[in-house]
Amino acid sequence: MELSQLRAVEIEINSHCNKACSYCPNSIGERVEQGSMKPTLFKRIIDQLVEIKFSGRISFDFYNEPLLCRDLDLFVSLTREKLPSSEIHLYSNGSLLSTERFLKLYHLGIAKFIITKHEDYFKDETKKYLFDQTYQDLSEELKKIVLFRTHDDLHLTNRGGALEHIKSHRLDISSQPCFIPNFMLSISVLGNIIPCFEDYFQKNSMGNIQEEDLDTIWNKPVYKKMRNALMLGARNKFDVCSKCNRLEVRPPV
């Protein structure tokens, strides 16, 4: 699989989140890496994507809340400028997304907003949720670029075995193929390449983009072996994958 086949890149621009939902590993541990991504590192990532003529989806998440990142506007603008053919998505819990903030991010280049209203607002109905009002304020045209969902709409997984209380509704998927590492990757706040977003504890880190270029990391024998093995259903060869209950039988879009 060529690097040019990448369809999605998720960049962890900051490590922190203002939620700790029961269906997220943030509720049981802390991110391996802490802090915010340096603009110099973000620019290196974008320049690498420019080199491979990337035109897929870019988002600014791993297990973080992007709106907590002070450089979000800069990163959106830089992405839009350098990768005009890519589509920029913002995944957020919406708790900090006012109408004014939404409109600014939209004009900077966000093409789609995926907003999830999480469980704490339903456990305590007296809590005010900012995006409820923001969504009401949007025009019908702008609402078309918003996927507004609740925690009940989420497809829950055990995050590579990190969340033991989340069981699979399927009896056995241990021999089923997984295509995630072939078509997307995550980049941690310090620049480590993670083949799959389910790997919260970064057990399958393949290299650091500050030390090697993306093409070199992608073509490492260990990375190729992982992608090929998972396409054949050999999940048991990798610790995180062997415990994961996500079934991804088609390339993610």
Image (tube, helix red, strand yellow):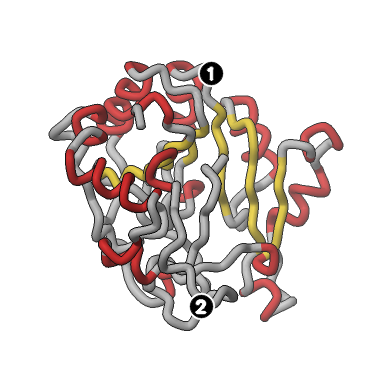
* Dot label at residue 40: none
* Left or right: residue 242 compared with residue 252: left
Q: Residues within 10 Å of mark 2 (few under 14, many from 20)?
A: some
Q: Residue at x 47, y 36 (%)?
A: 8
Q: Is residue 212 visible?
A: yes
Q: Nearer the viewer, residue 17 or 244?
A: 244
Q: Nearer the viewer, residue 177 or 94?
A: 177
Q: Position of residue 151 (x, y in %)?
A: 65, 67
Q: Residue furthest right?
A: 140
Q: Residue at x 40, y 49 (%)?
A: 231
* Left or right: residue 175 compared with residue 166: left
Residue type, numbered disc 2? Ile
The quadrant the C terminus occupies is: top right
Residue type, numbered disc 1? Ser
* Left or right: residue 219 compared with residue 128: left
Q: Position of residue 173 (x, y in %)?
A: 48, 68
* Dot label at residue 166: 2
Q: Is residue 104 visible?
A: no
Q: Earlier in the sequence, mark 1 or mark 2?
A: 1
Q: Residue at x 44, y 53 (%)?
A: 178
Q: Position of residue 73 (x, y in %)?
A: 48, 32
| Disc 2, SS | loop
Q: Residue at x 46, y 71 (%)?
A: 158
Which image quadrant is residue 213 in?
Answer: top left
Q: Which residue is mark 1?
A: 85
- Circles 1, 2 touching at the beta carbon (< 8 Å): no
Residue mark closest to the camera, 1 vs 2: 2
Q: Position of residue 29 (x, y in %)?
A: 33, 73
